[in-house]
Image (cartoon, rainbow, N blue to C red):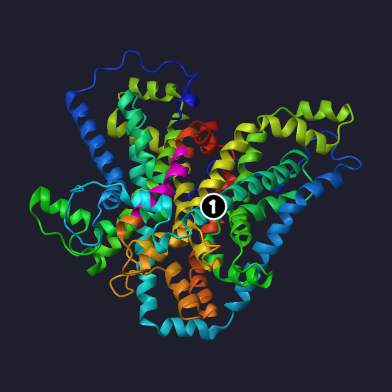
Amino acid sequence: MSLALASGRPARRPSRRPRRPLARIGAVVLGVVLAIWTLMPVYNMLLIALDDDAREYTGNIWPPAPSFDSFRVIWTEDYWYLENFWHQFGNSFFIGVMTMVLTVVIGSLASFALGRMRLRNGWVLSNASLLTYVLPASFLAIPFVHVAHRYGLSDSLWAVIIAQVMFATPYAILIFQQYGRLIPLELDEAARVDGASPGQIYLRIYLPLMAPALVAVGVYALLLAWNEYLYQFLLLSSTKSMTVAVALDQFFDSDEAPWNYMMSVAIVYSIPPIVIYYALRRYMVAGLTMGGTKG
Amino acid sequence: MSSTQQALAAGRTIALRSRWQPVWPGGLQGSERAWAIAFLVPYVAVFLAFVAYPVAYSLWLGRQPRLYAELAEDPLYLNTLVTTLLFVGVAVNVKLFLALLLSGFFMGKSRWIKALLALYMLPWALPAIPAFLSVHWMLVGQWGFLNSLLHALFGIEGPIWFNSYWLALGSNIASYIWKWMPFWTLIFLAGRMAIPQDIYDAADVDGATGVRRFAHVTFPLLANLYLICTLLSTIWTLGDFTTVFFVSSGAPSFTTEVLATMGMHAAFDTADPPLGVATMMSALPLLIPLVIVLMRRVHTNAVQL
């Protein structure tokens, strides 16, 4: 995956001694073990989702009579627990997209002022953002709920969006500052001489040249929001404002919910990030490993 | 930031005061200063309203000594503390060490290894909640998928995983490793790719291969990256809530809780937010030194790997 990054290096070791068969077998065994390890929970999801009678633990290791009925039930919201499924899916989607947009906008503006314009004493902000970056999200959850309530944001999707943005922005600033070093300063200088305002330099020069980093960070923020549970659980209480992640946990708590519906919901919920990740893998990897590959 | 996300500042140059010189020649002129401040307003506003205020508020909530006396008297708290240390210590170190080794495996050039790498990244792309719910169902009760599989393949009756402290803790650790190892493998893979081939060629000439090449060439070159990753991952794992909450849910009888889940229970299930905050804050003596060392490390090694 990071091959794009490695290309441009000289071809590797043309005359390496041939690999011993034992090492080859070892590699294959390791590969098989890794594949099984990786796929077990995923297979288990499918197993439960496809089993029409999943109320009982049957001890099956493959579905005896595979049925896609549970996916039909979800599609049509044909079960009282799933009445608002697509609405909740929309909520998750809204949170993800808004987190993505706000993180990229706020992060790129701040990184432009800090990294390119170098406002005096801006280093204080850089370090403050680094501190937020290393702060575990759960440590702030309790006071955040109180604060959101005080701002009148209880049971509001915006409270969740802000929480995500505040944890994603420091990372965005780091990546943008790093990536921004690759853009020659002479461009800014030429534009300044021509009388461009910083706003124009930001819009016409900085943003277009930063496109790959913007994509990487945007996807990162979207995946972060999609992965998150704690803040959504604490901040969203009504059925209408609930997200899929919270609804899934409700299933978990109830004794009578059919597990196959729950696992089908889990699978449907997992599809968007997987599609996005594999479609944009190249950008993601380039963005995430920028620090590592620079050396 | 269980997040995933977790992405990392490792080896990245961080702007620090010492080299905070103007980038734009001549510094900022005229209205440019106003522009720069305007650009920072959204970030500063979010930071003050939603980071600084909650941090200050939580320090205020957790200020009373009686909270910590209350915690110290709770036998579950001591147990939680030990479990947290075990969870963080084992999960982080096993995960990173395996990731470091596996990154070597994924340096392989064959087509199937590249395909396997794409598959191997799946846990990272998969959202945490569905994945951990699945792991929970895989292990729960007598006939979860894992026990069924053990029975079908080897005829063994598997244990009831969440009835034993060690098995439940082990399940939490394994799930955490499952979810996050791919990401760190990717980081180390990038680190390895940055090592120039000439160094390996030179080592080859000197006859260093296999384990010795790893011990004397690869590892020393990646040591700083490895250290920064360990610090960062320790901090994040200390705050991890999702894994324990979904996989073992504290079973058997709240013994496998970690500080993050215990704090949430105290704050929201027993409606005692100050106690919840105090539970979390009792991790600060560990957290603060880690953060300081991390910031200094990133600082002094600003250049690269």
Mark 1 is on which residue type? Gly
Answer whether residue B228 is visible to the viewer in this image.
yes
Left or right: A110, with B280 as reference point? right
Looking at the image, residue A84 lies above or below residue B34: below
Farthest residue to the left: give it: B155
| Residue occupied by mark 1 | A90
Farthest residue to the top: give it: A15
Residues A225 and B305: in front is A225
Residues A66 and B136: in front is A66
Q: Residue at x 46, y 77 (%)?
A: B269
Residue B138 figure quarter: bottom left
Left or right: A243, with B214 as reference point? right
By secondary structure, the bulk of the magenta-drawn segment is best described as: helix
Residue B46 figure quarter: bottom right
Residue A110 horizontal/vertical position (percent): 72, 46
Q: Residue at x 60, y 72 (%)?
A: B58
Q: Residue at x 39, y 77 (%)?
A: B77
Q: Residues within 10 Å of mark 1 (few under 14, many from 20)?
A: some
Q: Residue at x 86, y 36 (%)?
A: A197
Residue B151 horizontal/vertical position (percent): 11, 54
Answer whether residue B164 is visible to the viewer in this image.
no
The disc numbered 1 marks a residue on which chain? A
Looking at the image, residue A257 lies above or below residue B197: below
Left or right: B65, with B118 as reference point? right
Quarter holding the N terminus of chain A?
A: top left
Residue A263 horizontal/vertical position (percent): 34, 54
Q: Which residues are magenta?
A: A262-275
